[in-house]
Image: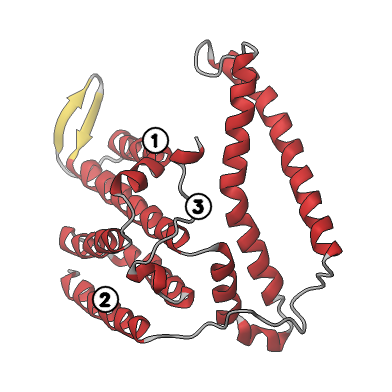
């Protein structure tokens, strides 16, 4: 399970995406998440898909690894697509499945939402795959630094985000361990009636929550033992500096943005 869930995991590498300043990647993905909701035709979605796929290939991470890591998301994408086919009643009737009629508008809307969701997950996953949690923390803290003037807890917020990202793969590994231990004791999570399968999940959730709280307590004690008292007066071992490659990527992303808005109807 841990190998099939890439969100929160970091893959070391020396690609151009790995070498980018975390602030550059966060900024580009932030604008990508916004402009994807302005796409309104096939060509505009094609531009965004081209940018996402180009970013994926540039990371030099195995495509099979990325696609395998997105496997848990495919269920949501497919479910969303089928839901639109059954609920949306716009356009002409294309065909019927039993007593349900599938409309052309439903097919288009289902494909649009599914593609949008897939691109969003892909781009946000590339951020964590190519950036260490510490770099993400430093990048977020640096970008939100002006909010310190209004006494906003910038460092604490960035730290919470970093810990959350780091604990995702840890919890997935813990879930895998517990599920294997329960399966060796005869617990079946995959067969039987829905009520029985829900009951079988309880022995999985209880130790998982106990383990999560235990890890959180150990982390808090370790931070206190090392004298952590927030971001006030703290220094950094590595200072973030924008390089020429960051400027190049910003210019390229701006060109993609211009092309995108020209393709909109």
Q: Secondary structure at mark 3?
A: loop
Residue at position x 52%, y 63% in the image: 132
Q: Which mark is residue 257?
A: 2
Coloring applied to the structure: secondary structure
Residue 42 position, x and y percent, is: 17, 58
Q: Quadrant of residue 4?
A: top left
Q: Observer-nearest residue: 109 or 36?
A: 36
Q: Which mark is residue 9?
A: 3
The answer to whether residue 129 is left or right of residue 156 is left
Question: Cα distance, mark 1 to mark 3?
Answer: 21 Å
Q: Secondary structure at mark 1?
A: helix
Residue at position x 73%, y 31% in the image: 207
Q: Secondary structure at mark 2?
A: helix
Quarter of the C terminus within the rendering: bottom left
Mark 3 vs mark 2, foreground winner is 3
Does residue 184 lie above or below 176 as drawn? above
Residue at position x 17%, y 76% in the image: 262
Q: Which residue is mark 1?
A: 75
Mark 1 vs mark 3, foreground winner is 3
Question: Cα distance, mark 3 to mark 2?
Answer: 28 Å
Sooner in the amino-acid sequence: mark 2 or mark 1: 1
Q: Quadrant of residue 57?
A: bottom left
State how many labels appear: 3
Does residue 143 lie above or below 2 as drawn? below
Q: Residues within 10 Å of mark 3 (few under 14, many from 20)?
A: many
Q: Residues within 10 Å of mark 2 (few under 14, many from 20)?
A: some
The answer to whether residue 140 is left or right of residue 231 is left
Sooner in the amino-acid sequence: mark 1 or mark 3: 3
């Amino acid at each position: 399970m841990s190998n099939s869930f890439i969100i929160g995991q970091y893959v070391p590498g020396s690609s151009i995406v790995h070498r980018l300043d975390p602030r550059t990647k966060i900024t580009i993905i932030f604008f990508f998440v916004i402009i994807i909701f302005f796409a309104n035709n096939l060509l505009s979605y094609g531009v965004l898909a081209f940018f996402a796929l180009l970013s994926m290939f540039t990371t030099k991470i195995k495509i099979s690894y990325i696609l395998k890591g997105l496997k848990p998301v495919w269920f949501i994408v497919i479910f969303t697509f089928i839901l639109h086919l059954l609920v949306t009643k716009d356009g002409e009737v294309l065909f019927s499945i039993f007593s349900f009629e599938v409309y052309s508008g439903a097919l288009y809307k289902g494909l649009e939402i599914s593609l949008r969701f897939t691109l969003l997950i892909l781009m946000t996953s590339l951020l964590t795959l190519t950036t260490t949690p510490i770099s993400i923390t430093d990048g977020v803290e640096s970008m939100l630094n002006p909010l310190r003037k209004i006494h906003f807890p910038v460092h604490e917020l960035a730290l919470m985000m970093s810990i959350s990202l780091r604990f995702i793969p840890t919890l997935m590994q813990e879930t895998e361990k517990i599920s294997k231990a329960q399966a060796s004791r005869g617990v079946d999570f995959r067969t039987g009636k829905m009520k029985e399968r829900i009951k079988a999940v309880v022995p999985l959730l209880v130790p998982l929550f106990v383990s999560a709280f235990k890890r959180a307590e150990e982390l808090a004690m370790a931070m206190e033992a090392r004298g952590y008292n927030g971001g006030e007066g703290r220094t950094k071992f590595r200072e973030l500096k924008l390089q020429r490659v960051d400027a190049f990527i910003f210019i390229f992303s701006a060109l993609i943005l211009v092309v995108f808005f020209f393709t909109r109807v």
